[in-house]
Image: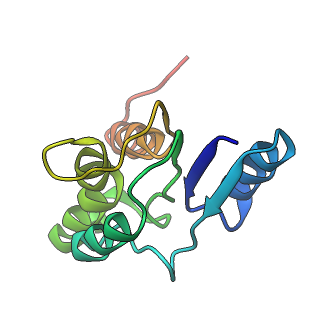
Amino acid sequence: MKKAIVIAGSRGIGKAIADALKSIDCQVKATSQKELDTSDLENVKEFVKENTETDILVLNTGGPPGKQFSEVTEEDWQKYHNQLFLVFAYLLNPTTTRLYCSLMFPTALLSYLLLGVQFLREFGCTFL
């Protein structure tokens, strides 16, 4: 039986992914934000100590809350960077963790792209 970890898998898209993996007989660990706060690297390190091996890793961390780009603070940027990028680099780096996986889906990286599009729209850019 294949093992899967779905980060942010307790509701929404993550839950749908977790349910789909269960339907094909995967053993799934689906985390919630209470169980794994991906904006807190120390919390992630503890999670990795307890979960050292998986066949499938779904990185489905939610993105930042909706707000105007000009209202995003430096503290927000650091949190988003940890949540949407740094934690994934940590999870996938074999020198910092022994979390082995054969397949990975970074769904949350889309949030960075969407935030960039919002930024460009605020400065008058349009998209076809």
Residue in the foreground of this view, choosing between 75 and 1: 1
Spot occupied by residue 93 in the image (x, y as percentages of width and height): 21, 42
- Total marks shown come to 0
Residue in the foreground of this view, choosing between 4 and 78: 4
Spot occupied by residue 86 in the image (x, y as percentages of width and height): 23, 52
Can you tell which quarter of the image residue 100 is in? top left
Task: Single out the residue that lies furthest toward the bottom.
Answer: 34
- The residue under the point 41% across, 41% down is 109
Spot occupied by residue 58 in the image (x, y as percentages of width and height): 54, 45
Can you tell which quarter of the image residue 23 is in? top right
Left or right position of 18 against 94: right
- The residue under the point 28% across, 56% down is 87
Can you tell which quarter of the image residue 128 is in? top right
Task: Single out the residue that lies furthest toward the top.
Answer: 128
- The residue under the point 50% across, 64% down is 66
Colour scheme in use? rainbow
Left or right position of 103 against 95: right
* Quadrant including the N terminus: top right
- The residue under the point 61% across, 62% down is 29
Task: Single out the residue that lies furthest toward the front.
Answer: 1
Above/below status of 88 relative to 66:
above
Residue in the foreground of this view, choosing between 43 and 13: 43
Spot occupied by residue 94 in the image (x, y as percentages of width and height): 21, 41
Left or right position of 39 against 78: right
Above/below status of 72 relative to 119:
below
